[in-house]
Amino acid sequence: MRAAPRALALAALLAATPGAEAAGAAGAPPLTLSPCQIEHPLRLTVVPADCGTLSVPENPAEPLGRRIGLRVARVGAINRRKQADPLFVLAGGPGQAAGEFYASVAAAFARIHRDRDILLVDQRGTGGSNRLDCDEDEERLYRASDAEITAFTERCLAKLKARANVAYYTTSLAVADLEQVRAALGFAQLNLYGVSYGTRVAQHYLRRYPARVRTVILDGVVPPGLSVGPALATDAEQALQRILARCAHEPACAAAFGDPARDYETLRAALKEHAVPVTLTDPAGGQSQQLDFNEEHLATVLRLGGYSADYAALLPLLLHGAAARADYAPLAAQFLLLKRSFESLAAGMHNSVLCAEDVPRYAGALLDRAALADTFMGTSEVDALALICALWPRGPVDADLHAPLHSDVPALLLSGSDDPVTPPRYAREAARGFSRALEVVLAGFGHGQLTAPCMDRVLAEFLRRGTTAGLDTGCTRNARPMPFFTSVNGPPP
């Protein structure tokens, strides 16, 4: 789920299979696929595929009004005798494009790709599907006032108005888009993999079109009843405390840093008083850069660093360097790297989803502002969203979007014990909606288990069998997160 500290929340093949281009159901619009390449958001890799664009009404109630194109890509199965039911991959955010997500993790789907097509639909408002984004100096927004956030939101809406009514980019419309793609490509059934916010999309598609879903994989689970926002700061704080406690209980990490929780508290107190000027070499471009490192920069590193066990392995080292030696450059470098990793997310689509589906429910969530203020994220996330959503048009939301789900479709639910945004208790809540669910929790891992050791085998076997009954997940219990770095050279031998 993409909901980072204040500024980021503002940004927030071969020829097609014969017959696949033809409409698969009466009234389904045509969809022609042709060879293309899917590119990693940082241009690190490309994946060959077949791509096309499906034209749909922006507002389904006005079929003769403005239309938008949905970017669709199919990564064709290697096996010529492939399975008939593909895997649809649903990205997170909200605001991440499915194609860009897949290009960054394609290796994790390699076993599945042998026998099944993989379908990627950039959700409306993301990637190649009329992306809703705005240009703004993200760095300046790290100390933005309420008035500046309001002005940014007004500029964003004015920019997007020429090509989008931002109200029509919600989950309820997105699942109808997915069904049109399925019908246009002629698939009778499909399998769903959703990560983070994509798990909300997957569950709502299953609610709307239960007969079309064979299996569902939910990775970093958002249960239907959850309002995203009120618990973000406390969940992130608790995850950080677990990471630091794990370091304190590992002999090599404790010998190097003592109790890293003390370094954390020292830094929070220092940065609360004043920002620290830092001169560093930009880790991406190599040029010298000046940065006044402040408490919101620290919050970004702590929050986004906890998403990945590999990044989390650096946190005690980074905190100790700054607290013990006033060496803030490594922390600042990580801030720049982590911030850039989220710049591909479409801020406007992110706002359209949260402002329609989550923020209106905050009043019933009983926000504990005192508890939020005691975290490294504080109240800035919910306060910024309140300002944005006071201006952002609110789109259509199905009345049952947040209602409990009841399904007998086999479901595999994945969590990391140290996930800062979708902790395992969310998967437990969602699992109650499935009569055939299996939960897997990886100890010491963060947000999204797709690339964890042996998970590719587990997912491929689940799809092959089509059931959780008897599924062997034992290898995941042996998975270990990256050991903590005790120096810049890495973990101890």
Image (cartoon, rainbow, N blue to C red):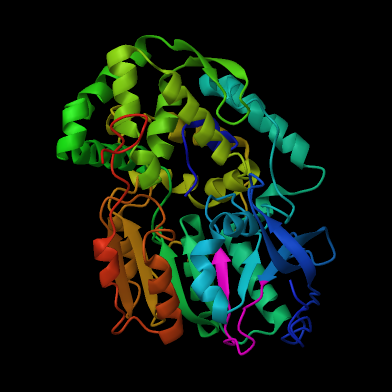
Residue 25 is covered by the magenta coloring: no
| Residue at figure coordinates x 53%, y 50% from the top left | 93
- Residue 361 shows up from this direction: yes
Residue 99 appears left or right of 251? right
Taking the view exactly as shown, the residue that stands out farthest to the right is 64
Residue 345 appears left or right of 332? right
Question: Residue 474: percent from the left, percent from the top?
Answer: 25, 71
| Residue at figure coordinates x 56%, y 78% from the top left | 114
For the record, the magenta segment spans 75-90
Residue 84 is covered by the magenta coloring: yes
Taking the view exactly as shown, the residue that stands out farthest to the front is 493
Compared with 387, 447 (above or below) is below
**Which residue is at the front of the view, 367 or 332?**
332
Give residue 266's quadrant in the image.
Answer: top left
Compared with 15, 195 (above or below) is above
In which quadrant is the C terminus drawn? top left
Question: Residue 144: percent from the left, percent from the top?
Answer: 55, 20
| Residue at figure coordinates x 39%, y 66% from the top left | 455
| Residue at figure coordinates x 73%, y 65% from the top left | 61
Residue 49 appears left or right of 289? right
- Name the main secondary structure of what is drawn in magenta: loop
Question: Residue 170: percent from the left, percent from the top?
Answer: 60, 56
Question: Residue 1: percent from the left, percent from the top?
Answer: 47, 50
- Residue 399 shows up from this direction: no
Give residue 449's quadrant in the image.
Answer: bottom left
**Which residue is at the front of the view, 150 or 307?**
307
Label count reads 0
